[in-house]
Amino acid sequence: MTEKFVVTGGAGYIGSHVCVELASAGHDVLVIDDFSNSHPEAVRRIQEITGVDISLLEVDLANPANLPKVIESVGAFDATGAVHLAGLKAVGESVEQPARYYDVNINAALTLLRALENAGAKKLVFSSSATVYGDLNESPVNETGATGAANPYGRSKLFIEEILKDIATADKDWRIANLRYFNPVGAHSSGRIGEDPNGVPNNLFPFIAQVAVGKRDKLRIFGDDYPTRDGTGVRDYIHVVDLARGHVAALDYLAETKQGGAIDINLGTGGGVSVKEAVAAFKRASNRDIPFEIAPRREGDIAEIYADTSLAKDLLNWRATKTLDDMCADHWHWQRNNPNGFKS
Ligand code: UD1
């Protein structure tokens, strides 16, 4: 059945891939984005890939003055639900500017909630993060694991999860999935959309990709003395297209379930990859040299985390299908064709 989904942050890295999968599954999409950390070209390319028209509302969701406009547009679109990805996401910046992070991330979520409530569209997928598990659990970590994020960015995710649970408890019509992403990497196989970070990338894959394409001299590996198989940090990297399909599966589940409420669901592959293994795989995929040096540990980093994915399998009938080599090949394809991201 065709449904109408609002995708906030729909021009961003994960959001653009979610839009492609939703449009390809036959759904109508309204992107809400202020392009503060994304590019309108991404929306054009979603349409190019899918051949489907995407509606767009360019607005800062976090500014309460925009509430009437958002309510109006979501109502006029006749939304049946939403995927909420809009927000600030730089860990280091969140430590320096906590008030701004809480203000933007929490107000954006509340504005969207009011607009959905007004439209009677009480179905929501929230873009949460494995960062909510902090350093408190043995891997594989499942959704009952202890939570306690290590920085304001992570805590804003956790607080929004809690707000959504309160809302779903108070009004049984709400159906909400908090998707806890592990580490999304890769790009659409067309090479037309992908991650386009501002400035120096914080995350591993965009950094490696910029070294491979010659934009940066070398990778700094943050620590090789962790208690892992080769001493470098281990993470659960997941192809962004698999992740995006997890959103479609979650919305299908929310459409069918009789049970109101808010549920937490991990989206990962269930396996761990070390920094050195990621570098070796990217080298194979790109056929480029990836020079690196060992640097001190990064503050706040943990040794190892990967997902228990059984809940997503059982509930959503979803699992990640793409390999580490697929992730590297697609990430490289995007990077090589768009060395300056959407500006090229
Ligand atoms: C980071 C964030 C996390 C966020 C996630 C989004 C921190 C402390 N955590 O997680 O809150 O949800 O990104 O994807 O920033 N590495 C290097 N050199 C680099 C970059 C990374 O060695 O230049 C290593 C890291 O030490 C880590 C691994 O690569 O072991 C992955 O790092 P990254 O991509 O930043 O992801 P996370 O640390 O898992």
Image (cartoon, rainbow, N blue to C red):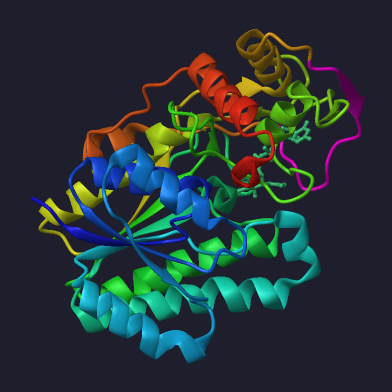
Whether residue 143 is visible here, answered yes or no, is no
Residue at left offset 55%, top offset 30%: 236
User: Relative to 208, is 263 on the left or the right?
Assistant: left
- Ligand 1's quadrant is top right
Task: Judge whether 167 appears above or below 81 on screen.
Answer: below
User: Relative to 19, is 134 on the left or the right?
Assistant: right
Magenta-colored span = 290-303
Q: Is residue 71 magenta?
A: no
Residue at left offset 91%, top offset 34%: 296
Residue at left offset 30%, top offset 40%: 50
Residue 7 horizontal/vertical position (percent): 37, 60
Given residues 309 and 318, the one toward you in this image is: 318
Residue 19 horizontal/vertical position (percent): 35, 49
The chief SS type of the magenta part is loop
Given residues 307 and 244, the one toward you in this image is: 244
User: Relative to 301, is 171 on the left or the right?
Assistant: left
Q: Quadrant of residue 169?
A: bottom left
Residue 91 horizontal/vertical position (percent): 71, 55
Q: Is residue 294 magenta?
A: yes
